[in-house]
Image (cartoon, helix red, strand yellow):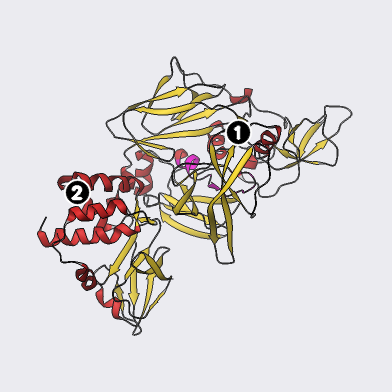
Amino acid sequence: MNINIMPGGGNMASIEYGIDGYGLKVYAEEALSGRTYICHYCHEEILVRKCYDRDDYFAHKSISNRTPQQMMCPGYTGEGKIEDKVDQVYITNGGLPLYLCEYISGKYQLNAYFSPISQKSMNLLESWNSIIEITECGKKEEYYANSIKYYRLKTDAEWIKIKCRNVENIIPEVQRKWEWGIRGLNCEKDIFHSNYGGGYRVALHSNIVAGKEYLIISKYRSVPNVSGITYYQKGTIRFNNLYNIKEYNVYSMVVDKVTDQAIAYIQNKGYQLIEQSDEIIPMWPPAVIEGKELIYRRKDHTAYLYHNKRSEQQLFNIGGYGLRNIVENSKIFEVSTDNKIVLLSDYKFNCLSNEIRFMLTQTRNNFDNDNLFIPRITWKDDSGLVKQLSEDDIELLSLKKVYIDADVDFVTCIVKGVCIEKSTKRVLEGKHLGRKIIISMEPFGTTVIEDKKAVKREGESNLDIESIIKELYRCSSAMVPINRDFFEVYRFAVNNSEELFRIMKNWAVKKQMPYAAVRYLYRIKEVLKNEHY
């Protein structure tokens, strides 16, 4: 039987200790008056209050417009204090999960992924035609609730607000999973897991494991010299907004040796350094893994995971009943696949320690391609004639000047081979025969326009698909969202080519494909048309 528990033994009336400039714990009776310390719950500045008639204690400096992270701090007692344990879990994990993604070798971006919600909640949002409003540094963007899967951060804002509009009733699940917003980048504190192509951000108050590779983002050209920690630069991340361009460095970080300096450095960032961590491994049934998300088939109601317990960390589960511990009678435990979350917690380190390890969901029909919002793109020439843009507008390639508009954010690239010759957000000028025009509309996919005569010159319609499959294996260029050509070829591959299906299934899971593969899929599509598959 699952038992509800109160993490950390209940609400704390004060801040237990502060972190000094060396990353070391300092208790109130040891702290020096007038010196600034850091709260280990919300990472804000605190001061010690020395008293004659009561124990010494820490208190926050005055903060206006508190973020959710600041409002759940045990040392905060003001209006809007967040005490619900499930809400605290999502806030500790940064609101929407944040991923550091390598979209091209050495180039990174930050994407916040919308956590899966139940089909019941999504059906309500769809029936109300609900809008997701995202506000970053005062600039608002709007998306249909059933269309957006991730949002790319454009600045290093402290907190990005999310509001669900056009809702007739409050949906608690949407409030908790989406409307806490996105905790933005904090170069001084944030640590990311290191996986293929990037990694997701480590939750606050979690454990950092010695010997394991992590990623950090630095505003500076160098990293601190910390005994026991090695770094090497992996690339850069750039933020472009209306006002300026900021470029930071991305470094690999490994704690090779547990030294006092390494412990203090990790603790100063808000984490705990340990030598061995618990392993949680999905075992059965097979699932598609996207970051933290385990996506099962709808007929698979129960999943079995392996937990190699090496520390005092505990497992918890979030479902419709709230936060509960997972009873472990052996190393294998089971959990429902229907919209559940598995947490790994270490309350002995911090009463707010709750890292979301896995989000279990069944097939996400609400993100199927057929249900996606279809952007409307138009173009007009110098005469002001407005047309609907399509892949068959070959005459677009010969016009001198074309003005493009859309009801979503987009960028247009003129491409020769695998090189981008020019990018624009509004005007195409000059002749582009023999070029591709790619209109990228994150997160809604891409539209590709090209000179079909030039494509035909590359080879007749009766192409050898098997030879193209060999070329697809070699495609390793920048990733772009999958498009309509992809799904036409994908449907063919399911029934006609096991090898082609194997390649495309991997891209379908990621909803991205190498840019270099786009031209090959287009050519396969033309073959299918000509040979009447």
Q: Find the magenta span and give its range.
A: 174-190
Residue 32 x %, y %:
85, 36
Image: 500 above or below 72: below
Q: State whether residue 488 appears in this view.
A: no
Name the residue: 60% across, 33% down: 83
Between circles 2 and 1, the one closer to the viewer is 2
Left or right of residue 455: residue 108: right
Residue 279: percent from left, percent from top: 47, 27
Residue corresponding to mark 1: 83
2 or 1: tag closer to the N-terminus: 1
* Residue at disc 1, secondary structure: loop
Q: Which is nearer the eye, 267 or 304? A: 267
Mark 1 is on which residue type?
A: Glu
Q: Residue at x 47, y 38 (%)?
A: 172
Residue that carries the numbered disc 2 in the rendered image:
493
Q: Residue furthest right?
A: 52
Please state, as top left, top right, bottom left or bottom right, where the N terminus lies in the image: top left
Please, what secondary structure does the residue beneath circle 2 have? helix
**In terms of depth relative to the viewer, which is nearer, 351 or 312?**
312
Which quarter of the rendered picture does the C terminus lie within?
bottom left
Q: Is residue 186 magenta?
A: yes
Q: Is residue 36 left or right of residue 68?
A: right
Residue furthest bottom in the image: 383
Q: Which mark is residue 137?
A: none
